Image (cartoon, grey):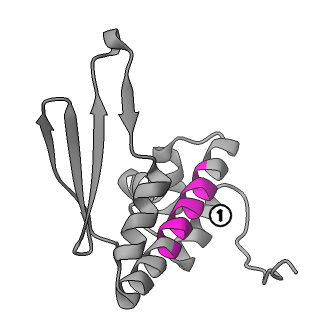
Amino acid sequence: MKPHVKLKGVHKQDRWITFALDWEGYQIIYLVEGRSEKMGYMKTTPWEEAHEQALAAMTPEGRAKYEAASIEAEARLQLAELVYDARIDAGLSQTELAQRAGTRQTVISAIENGAQAPGWVMLSRIAHAVGGKLSIDKATPPA
């Protein structure tokens, strides 16, 4: 299940810009204060600070959902990079890879941008299409 993140709005007032995001019912607000580049002044809220504040405001159930969504998002990004690198190393376009893997270019694009998490069968077809094979090994966690 994809986490639902939505930009709720951008509001400008005087020198403040507010970006409001909605994540699974939690509203995260980023404030940016600044003047034009000519004046050379801009102040932002660091991502880490805003992230920690949002996490602290979550219920334990909300935090567990967030952590699960984070794990899924990280896996999607790793798979996206894996497929992209394999395709580039094979010297193929998305269309060529899609034809070899028996799918559409839009599917390859969705996998490479992290919008779609491919299953074992699709990953196997992609691996064969670039001249490889798919295997999974159990990694031992660092001590």
Please, which residue is most extreme toward the top here?
38
Q: Residue at x 45, y 51 (%)?
A: 47
Membership of 73 in magenta stretch: yes
In the image, 23: left or right of 100? left
Residue 103 can be seen in this image? no
Screen quadrant of the N terminus:
bottom left
Q: Position of residue 77 (x, y in %)?
A: 53, 60
Region rendered in magenta: 71-84
- What's the amino acid at mark 1? Ala
In the image, 53: left or right of 136? left
Which residue is disc 1 drawn over? 127
Badge 1: how crowded within 10 Å, few (<14), some, or many (20+)? some
Membership of 81 in magenta stretch: yes
In the image, 83: left or right of 11? right
Q: Nearer the viewer, residue 57 or 3?
A: 57
- Mark 1, secondary structure of its residue: helix
Q: Residue at x 21, y 38 (%)?
A: 17
